[in-house]
Amino acid sequence: MNFFIMTLFPDMVESVLSESILGRAGEKGLIHTEAVNIRDYSKDKHKKVDDYPYGGGAGMVMQAQPIYDCFTSIRDRINGSYKCIYLTPQGQCFSQPLAKSLSREENLILLCGHYEGVDERVLEEIVDMEVSIGDFVLTGGELPAMVMVDAISRLVPGVLHNEDSAFTESFENGLLEYPQYSRPEVWKDKTVPSILLSGDHAKVDAWRMEQSLLRTKMRRPDLLDEKSEENT
Ligand code: ADE
């Protein structure tokens, strides 16, 4: 799966995506991530990419031309299907189901905005979907783009060592994850729940399911409402 990130800060994106699990997935050829510098496509002699907003107001607006040319340079070397996504607080909220459905795409082109926004005309021309990572405003779309690449990549077969872990954890079954314990058996006078030491897998599974339900009820009852709506 290929991710093309259109950004004014390619170093920021590359430094994150070349590390850890995503870095290894890149080396293994399971994913390909590429930060493409929008500024390289500016036709301005000073490589300017923004200008004042028509109608006045604070801040600068990213201009259409460099973004459009950056996009077409990527699109023209992609074979297969793609989706172009603009990261913005105005978009649809990112979620595990959306990550799952996007992990089936061959190519994702992610547009990171900056300043006060992006000229609406280029958004109309190239963007298939607008996505927000939550109801707060960040200084740019780079961190949201990296959040998306991370959440989607780990669903690509082979990226995680233990294939099970992508499916047993929080949100995959619409519930929060049960508590986990590792050695030692006693730490600061706290003991591991005895059922986990019993070796009885059926009992362990039942306990974990009960804990997941309890946690979800206490911390995120809205998820249980969503689940029951799905089943009606
Ligand atoms: N750009 C700035 N804030 C954002 C957010 N919350 N989600 C996606 N893109 C953004």
Image (cartoon, rainbow, N blue to C red):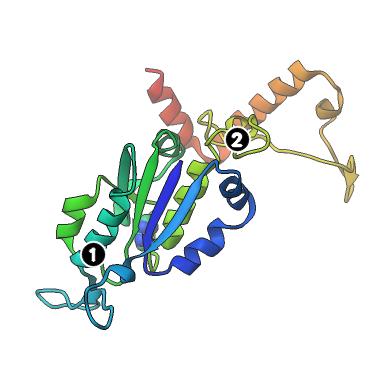
**Would you place residue 38 above or below residue 53 in this image?**
above
Q: Viewed as shown, does residue 8 lie left or right of 168? A: left
Q: Position of residue 133 (x, y in %)?
A: 41, 52
Query: Quick one: 23 or 169, which is closer to the camera?
Result: 23
Displayed quadrant of residue 120: bottom left
Mark 1 or 2 closer to N-term? 1
Identify which residue, 205 or 217, lies in the foreground: 205
Q: Is residue 95 above or below residue 90?
A: above
In the shown orientation, is residue 100 left or right of residue 61? right
Of 157 and 178, the residue lying toward us: 157
User: Decide: marks 1, 2 in contact (CB < 8 A)?
Assistant: no
Which residue is located at x 14 percent, y 59 percent?
121
| SS under mark 1 | loop
Residue depicted at x 26% and y 78%:
48
Q: Is residue 133 visible?
A: no
The residue at which mark 2 appears reads as 158
Whether residue 194 is situated above or below residue 201 in the rendered picture = below
Under mark 1, the amino acid is: Val
Q: Which residue is mark 1?
A: 118
Provide the secondary structure element on which disc 2 rests.
loop
| Left or right: residue 131 compared with residue 58 | right
Of badges 1 and 2, nearer the viewer stands 2
| Residue 196, percent from left and from top | 81, 28
181 sits left or right of 174 in the view: right
